[in-house]
Image: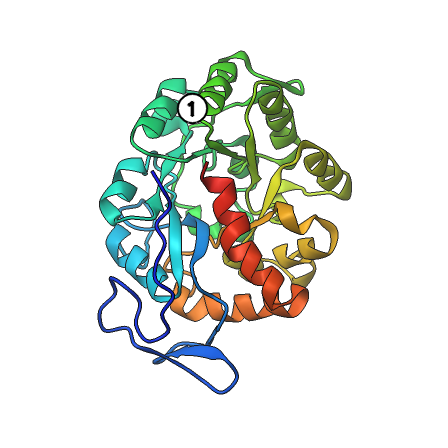
Amino acid sequence: MAPHRSDRVNRRRPGVPGTPTDTDSEGERVRCGAPAMPDWAQDMADLHVHSAPSLVPRHGDDRETVAAMRALGFTTLVLKAHEGGTAARAAAAGPGTYGGVVLNSCVGGGNPEAVRVAAALGGRMVWLPTLSSRAHRAAAAAPELAVHRHVELRPVDVTEDGRLRAEWFDVLDAVAAHDLVLASGHLSTADALVVFAEARRRGVRRLLVNHPKLAFLRWREETADAFRALGAHCELGVVPDLLGPPEDSSLRLTRCYPLPLLVFGGDLGHRGFPAPAEAVAPWLRELERRIGARAAADLMTTTTRDLLLP
């Protein structure tokens, strides 16, 4: 399925009636009642979008969420749900919207059939366990996980004694066969490295570390070196940067991790955090301040989309 491309217009977003924009004298798009978006923020991609239905409160359902993101200039979106699969939901939400499957206990954990079905429905992402991961369960009381505190899923083990458990080999083979993105979910960075190393050996080409700087995942400098050697992409996101102190901002990765291996996954959608119309523009302006407008535009468009799509 080819990626959806929108016409780059400043006055009105396609498919989102009633969302006029203007351009101010500083070259930033201004939406009524929302922070100004940089002028370069067009045709963007977001690999980490949450919407309803969900076990946790969301700002909107799939269609409402997609419309809100399109109004901000996003044309490629990935819907994620801790509860299971989103490929069919994404197909119904409109062109340029993709899904996948999160391998928590509610889909059987290391279940290659769940991966194959997601791929057959047009899904592009496979997330390793999130709420079912040992790292998440061990840190359930941590402030950054407070929004999930009332949702508890059975644990799913991925590694044992520093090695990948045997039931996950078929999962990796299914990911490789369909050229999907394998994302780390809420695995600790140590466990994600074990999985990613085996995934590379089995032919998985697209690797993504989700919100790597969240404290409970235990990111370390030597971890960064190992992920870099595997060619793994790292996710920059709005919500992780709202949750942690400035020194743990995902944007700090722009100083120490190769820009061609950084992509955007906002992780927005929970009602406990600002809506995208409030949160995205300030984050984009900070990204631009750190790496410049051209590099920011490349990261938010081509680099992120190229990881997702063949």
Q: How is the image coloured?
A: rainbow
Residue 14 visible from this viewpoint: yes
Residue under label 1, please give it. 109
In the image, 210 versus 147, the foreground residue is 210
Q: Is 51 displayed left or right of 217 in the figure? A: left
Residue lying furthest front: 7
In the depicted structure, whether residue 183 falls above or below residue 162:
below
| Residue 264 in sight here | no
* Residue placed furthest toward the bottom: 25
Using residue 238 as the reference point, say whether residue 191 is left or right of it. right
Residue 44: x %, y % from top left: 45, 57
**SS type, badge 1:** loop
* x, y percent for residue 145: 50, 48
The total of numbered circles placed on residues is: 1
Please give the name of the residue rendered at 26% of the width and 37% of the height, measured from the top-left corner. 88
Where is residue 54, by image quadrant?
top left
Give the quadrant of residue 16. Answer: bottom left
- Viewer-nearest residue: 44 or 286: 44
Q: Which residue shows up at 31% across the image and 27% down it?
A: 120
What type is the residue that disc 1 sits on?
Gly
Crowding at dot 1, Cα within 10 Å, few <14 / some 14-19 / many 20+, comes out as many
The quarter of the image holding the N terminus is top left
Which percent across, then down, holds residue 63? 25, 54
Q: Name the residue rendered at 61%, 24% in the picture.
A: 200
Q: Is residue 310 above or below residue 115?
A: below
Which residue is located at x 55 percent, y 25 percent? 204
Given the current orientation, which residue lies at the most extreme top position?
166
Q: What x and y, as percent, mark residue 105?
A: 40, 27
